[in-house]
Amino acid sequence: MEEKKRILSGIQPSGALTLGNYVGALRNWVELQKTDEYDCYFMLADLHTITVRQEAKDFRKNAMDLLALFIACGLDPEKNPIFFQSHVPAHAQLSWVLTCNTYMGELSRMTQFKDKSQKHTGNINAGLFTYPSLMAADILLYQADLVPVGADQNQHLELTRDLANRFNNAYSETFKVPEGYIPKVGARVMSLQDPMQKMSKSDPNENSYILLLDSPDAVVRKIKRAVTDSGSEVRRGEGKAGIENLMSIYSAMTGKSLEEVEAEFEGKGYGIFKAAVADAVVETLTPIQARYRELMENKDYLQQVYRSGAEIASRTAAKTLAKVYRKVGFIQP
Ligand code: ATP
Ligand code: LTN
């Protein structure tokens, strides 16, 4: 029997999940899982999270929240492992080998590093700099064919492919060279307050993002306040980034194409459109929130999910790591 293709992706438990994370990443994982065409590995990228200083108590809460949200959004732990990156030591181990094969020049070009070092001037640590080598290790350990992420991760994926090729050329074929899977609509959900910036959970202005756990009132309020333009037509075009962003959110929530959205709201004005966007978001979030609350009542179940996830992930990861260690020339223990 032909082996299924592999998927790996991850999200950091660095704060409450936004609609951007859902539309750009998580929702697509659920869709890809449903096709039954892939073996998927879904990771909570907690090693990545400490590149920015975390309060241990909040960090633990965010990590359990994210796990519950993964499941609440539709990931099925019976089908595919869900695990914490820190529970599978091979990530840190392969990351070191890859770091020794990554050039300083490559890492200095990463826009996420530039952005984050501007945001956290008091803590520009080496981990923030070498983070892409760890991300490459995450992906290459599982010999992933496909990596579903938002558009902001494209540069990291390119580096991952370069590292895979570099290692394969230097030491013989070892890693699968992965492809990104970046959605057509919603790959970059923008801030509701500044449609030139991506929606981000670390934005200090809470009106700029919608959280998956926001109440219906909060969703309505934030969308009502979303920055648009002085026109009144719901369509794409020059100077209409705010409306376009709301259109892609609506399209992602309802499955309608952007053309269909334009047709639906022709001549209707922004007030009616914004109300419809808010309704669609609330309709998507309500069942997710209900399931999330149930799951948070059942910590034993969550523990069982991440423990069995780590066991399965560790077996796959260990195979790749053993190959790499052998090829590099480490003496077998
Ligand atoms: P931070 O704001 O702390 O940098 P983040 O919100 O960017 O974090 P990550 O954990 O880095 O979240 O990203 C998880 C996934 O969500 C990635 O696949 C990323 O591409 C995707 N993603 C994040 N923000 C958006 C967005 N605004 N639009 C679409 N996808 C997004
Ligand atoms: N860097 C990613 C999170 C992440 C990831 C991964 C995504 C860590 N490891 C492996 C895909 C594959 C981010 O979204 N900031």
Image (cartoon, rainbow, N blue to C red):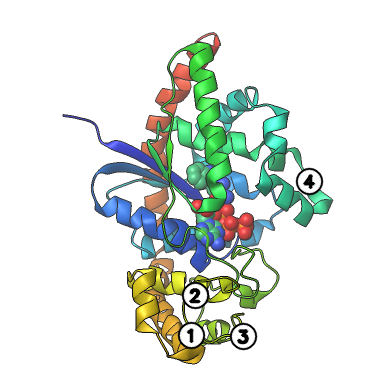
SS under mark 4: loop
Residue 320 sits above or below residue 328 on the image: below
Residue 230 numbered mark, or none: 3
Q: Amino acid at mark 4?
A: Ile
Nearer-the-camera pick, 293 or 274? 274
Labels 3, 1: front one? 3
Q: From the image, which quarter does the N terminus lie in?
A: top left
Which sits earlier in the primary sequence, circle 1 or circle 4? 4
- Give me the residue at 48% from left, 90% from top: 269
Labels 1, 4: front one? 1
Counting from the top left corner in percent of width and height, residue 288 is at: 38, 71
User: Is disc 4 surrounded by few (<14), some (14 to 19) or many (20+) residues within 10 Å?
Assistant: some
Q: Amino acid at mark 2?
A: Leu
Which sits earlier in the primary sequence, circle 1 or circle 2? 2
The extreme front residue here reads 238
Q: CA distance from mark 4 to mark 3?
A: 40 Å
| Residue named by callout 4 | 124
Please report contact status of discs 4 and 3: CB closer than 8 Å, yes or no.
Answer: no
Which sits earlier in the primary sequence, circle 4 or circle 3? 4
Which sits earlier in the primary sequence, circle 2 or circle 4? 4
Q: Is 240 left, or right, of 290 in this rendering?
A: right
Q: CA distance from mark 2 to mark 4?
A: 34 Å
| Residue named by callout 1 | 274
Q: Is 137 left, or right, of 291 in this rendering?
A: right
Residue 246 numbered mark, or none: 2
Q: Is mark 1 within 8 Å of ligand 1?
A: no
- Give me the residue at 72% from left, 37% from top: 108
Which sits earlier in the primary sequence, circle 3 or circle 1? 3
